[in-house]
Image (tube, rainbow, N blue to C red):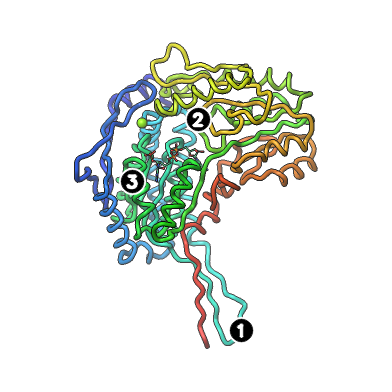
Amino acid sequence: MAHTHESWQVRAAALQFEGRAFINGEYTPASDGRTFPCVNPANGRTLTEVTHCGPAEVEAAVAHARKAFDHGKWPALAPRARAAILKRFAALIREHGDELALLETLDMGKPIGDSTSVDVPGAAYCVEWFAEAIDKIGGELAPVDPSLVGLISREAIGVVAAVVPWNFPILMASWKFGPALAAGNAVILKPSEKSPLTALRLGQLARLAGIPDGIFQVLPGGGDVGKALALHMDVDCLAFTGSTGVGKLIAGYAAQSNLKRVWLELGGKSPNIVLKDCKDIERAARAAAGAIFFNMGEMCTAGSRVLVHRDIKPQFMAALKKAAEGYQPGDPLDPSTQMGAIVDSIQYDKVLSYIDQGIAEGATLVHGGRAAPDRPGLFIEPTIFDCPRADLTICREEIFGPVLSVITFDDVEQAIHIANDTPYGLAAAVWTADLTTAHVVSRQLRAGTVWVNCYDEGGDMNFPFGGFKQSGNGRDKSLHALEKYTELKSTLIKL
Ligand code: NAP
Ligand code: MG
């Protein structure tokens, strides 16, 4: 039965929250009893108190993970057997889909229609995809001297810590633990303190699916928990999604400790280029609005810079403003809401201060620009700036909110120069009717993903996802993700 606004509210009022850490198969409070409040940004109410893990919990979780990996059965299971357990895990995520979606929406403010259609099914699909893949990929036989048999194989890396952000909490987590568990590792998940609830709920579902104790653990807490994991001598790999600033710190922690493998999925300032020969300007404008206003703009791949050719700009801007009107902020529990609340007051203040800075530096506000009136929570209108230059702060820094900077160009070379003139390189898009232009421009864009005549397409697992330059290293999704969670081994046998 389809849920209504009212039925989601009723379910939300009756929801039970698990706020304790999940360590070695049990929910446990911190040894010092420390907690932090988990707040619903749509109304400011505290949902529950959540365990703030400290050094004792980090030590315990790493020791359990170490033991489960070094002496337990998980890494030694036949890939087919691990796959069966992970497929059960995926099925349980689907079975509890409404509950997980509700937790996600209450915790971080995203529209319930997105949590139910994107985040939760996406996480289940990711776990299932890697489960299905893992018993179908083998090693290699090296073409060596006939007196040798040369085997090239991949082995699980060991204890993997996954430190993830709050914008797609369950989905970003699944992009790490899906491939890492499939490859046979022990995973310690550190969700953001802004959105820990779905990760914690997953602990019990993992256990129900048959994942052994110590193989999947969840440590809620702040950045100090992520730091302790990144500095830990018994953590073999740190898979991170978050800001470029924290990513640099994590690379440093690895260097200071055991040179653990570090994989970084970081920020972006992605250019969305609309060329003069764009065939369907209305469609490009709708996609441009979706690229920045979906998920309140709290998206690493947000198309936060639109580069539009001067000749088509009037028509494009009119269509863009019309499309933006479809993203008026609303109650995240209303299934018709397209844009929800900003995750917390820190992020909210940051976004509003970028809007002020845009105005102060001379950009023209063409749409939105205010905290949404008549709403008690943390809502900001979809905002569009027409920028006189590409070097304004709002054109250069990642805002991570519903703020779009439009920059005008006169020829393709200029557009490519502006597009690449950024420390980031996560994603980019180009709109053109010409096949050659599409290929030539795509090749020149320094970004991990390039969309042509679309934006944010390709929700399936087949595409590697990650960045060039300071948007990070390594790739989530696709079979390439398994490279992060395995070590290559050469075995040479003399005959
Ligand atoms: P963040 O502040 O960097 O935090 C990410 C995670 O790191 C959180 O779990 C955070 O914990 C933890 N953390 C904070 N300080 C730490 C430290 N010193 N050592 C270890 N861990 C630490 O990023 P965010 O604000 O959550 O997320 C937004 C950023 O993520 C944006 O830059 C966005 O572009 C990026 N992002 C990238 C991708 C991608 O795939 N490339 C996807 C989504 C988001 P607490 O939150 O508990 O402090
Ligand atoms: Mg919250």
x and y percentages locating residue 99 in the rendered image: 35, 34
Earlier in the chain: of badge 2 and badge 1, it is 1
| 455 displayed left or right of 172 | right
Ligand 1 image-quadrant field: top left
Please give the name of the residue rendered at 62% of the width and 26% of the height, measured from the top-left corner.
Answer: 405
In the rendered structure, which amino acid carries the disc numbered 3? Val
In three-dimensional space, the C-alpha distance between marks 2 and 1, rounded to whole angstroms, equals 56 Å
**Quarter of the rendering containing residue 363:** top right
x and y percentages locating residue 331 in the rendered image: 42, 20
| 95 displayed left or right of 117 | left
Residue extending furthest toward the left: 32
- Residue beneath disc 1: 145
Q: Nearer the viewer, residue 22 or 377?
A: 377
Question: In the picture, which quadrant includes the N terminus?
Answer: top left
In the rendered structure, which amino acid carries the disc numbered 1? Asp
In the rendered structure, which amino acid carries the disc numbered 2? Asn
- Residue beneath disc 2: 295
Element carrying mark 2: helix
- Residue beneath disc 3: 225
